[in-house]
């Protein structure tokens, strides 16, 4: 939403917000002061953990490994029984 003078919308002095061209979001400061910082931190960790879990699940579900033959060299000393 553009202003009549062609500029972006202005914030009111008591609000917190950010502007995207054509969109302005703001909220009163007291609304965010009521949410405890620890709760926001835990919610952020939960969201990031959920995204990580979803990524790992997608990799495990959609990526198919290609089977191939493997050979390992074993030294002769490992094949002989121990002397008693």
Image (cartoon, rainbow, N blue to C red):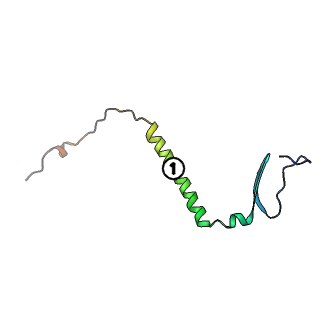
Front residue of this view, candidates 75 and 16: 16
Report which quarter residue 42 is drawn in: bottom right
**What is the x, y in percent for residue 25?**
76, 53
Report which quarter residue 61 is drawn in: top left
> Mark 1: which secondary structure?
helix
Q: Is residue 33 left or right of residue 58?
A: right
Name the residue furthest left: 84
Residue at 83% over, 63% down: 13
**What is the x, y in percent for residue 28?**
75, 62
Residue at 39% over, 32% down: 66
Callout 1: 10 Å neighbours few (<14), some, many (20+)?
few
**What is the x, y in percent for residue 47?**
56, 54
Name the residue furthest right: 5
Residue at 23% over, 41% down: 74
Residue at 80% over, 45% down: 22
Residue holding disc 1: 52
**What is the x, y in percent for residue 9?**
84, 52
Q: Is residue 8 left or right of residue 71?
A: right
For residue 14, above or below residue 61: below
Total of numbered circles in the picture? 1
Report which quarter residue 44 is drawn in: bottom right
Q: Is residue 25 left or right of residue 60?
A: right
For residue 65, above or below residue 13: above
């Amino acid at each position: 939403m553009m202003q009549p003078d062609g500029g972006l919308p202005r914030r009111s002095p008591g609000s917190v917000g950010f502007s995207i061209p054509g969109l302005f979001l703001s909220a009163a400061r007291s609304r965010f002061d009521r949410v405890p910082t620890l709760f926001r931190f835990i919610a952020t960790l939960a969201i990031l953990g959920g995204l990580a879990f979803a990524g790992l699940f997608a990799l495990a579900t959609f990526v198919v490994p290609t089977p191939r033959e493997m050979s390992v060299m074993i030294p002769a000393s490992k094949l002989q029984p121990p002397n008693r």
